[in-house]
Structures are given as C-alpha cells and as structure tokens.
C-alpha cells in the first residue's frame, strides 16, 4: 500500500498566493480554483486579508473582484525578501521550514 502524503501549506503562504492571484483583479471563483481552496476556506481568508487591509473588494463592470491594496503588495515584497534571504542559507544547513518551497 502506498502512502499518499498531502503537503500542507502554511496560512501565510496561502495568503500570499491569494494576493498574488488577485494582482490584476480576480473574482472569488477564480481565486478559489487557482489557490485550491474550498468556498468556506476562501471566505475565511478573504475576510482576514480584508481586515488586515491587504486585499480590497471592488466592483468592476458589475461584478465583484478582489485586488491587493498597497499594503498587500508590500506584504508580497517582504515575503519574497524573506524567502530570498533564507534560500541563501537553508539548503546548506538542512533545516525544514513549513512554508519554505
């Protein structure tokens, strides 16, 4: 019997993915499928990102879309800087970080 281990994503990674997906403005459905989330999970993340002022809901051509705020874009830049900094050192020290690719 083969064991199928699903790789779990850290919440910060999921939040960053949602912000990245929504960069050019995305519907809930688009974000849900691209981020591989259930509808209830998506709603929780969208609410949290909105409360943190990282994502905003807009109406465009009569439909609701989500786009990152300036603060959301800053969050993405900071996360990329952290990953870049860690990637220089982690492979050499054999340390596993849950959200590190």
Image: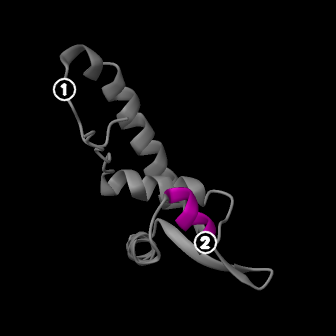
Residue 5: image quadrant is top left
Mark drawn on residue 26: none
Q: Nearer the viewer, residue 71 or 63?
A: 63
Q: Residue furthest right?
A: 61
The residue stretch that appears in magenta:
29-35
Residue 67 shown left or right of residue 97 in the figure: right
Could you classify mark 2 by the number of other residues whose Cα lies within 10 Å: few (under 14), some (14-19), or many (20 or more)? Answer: some
Could you classify mark 1 by the number of other residues whose Cα lies within 10 Å: few (under 14), some (14-19), or many (20 or more)? Answer: few
- The tally of labels here is 2
Residue 14: image quadrant is bottom left
Q: Which residue is mark 2?
A: 29
Q: Earlier in the sequence, mark 2 or mark 1?
A: 2
Q: What colour scheme does the image use?
A: one colour
Q: Nearer the viewer, residue 15 or 81?
A: 15
Q: Where does residue 9 sit, x and y in percent of width and height?
A: 33, 50
For marks 2 and 1, give the one nearer the viewer: 2
Q: Which residue is mark 1?
A: 95
Residue 61 shown left or right of residue 95 in the figure: right
Is 19 within the magenta? no
Q: Where does residue 67 sit, x and y in percent of width and height?
A: 60, 66
């Amino acid at each position: 019997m083969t064991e199928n281990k699903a790789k779990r994503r850290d919440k910060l990674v999921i939040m960053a993915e949602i912000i990245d997906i929504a960069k050019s403005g995305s519907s809930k459905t688009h974000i849900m499928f691209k981020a591989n989330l259930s509808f209830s999970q998506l709603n929780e993340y969208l609410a949290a990102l909105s409360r943190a002022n990282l994502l905003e809901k807009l109406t465009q051509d009569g439909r609701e879309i989500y786009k990152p705020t300036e603060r959301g874009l800053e969050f993405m830049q900071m996360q990329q800087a952290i990953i870049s900094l860690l990637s220089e050192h982690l492979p050499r020290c054999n340390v596993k970080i849950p959200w590190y690719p």
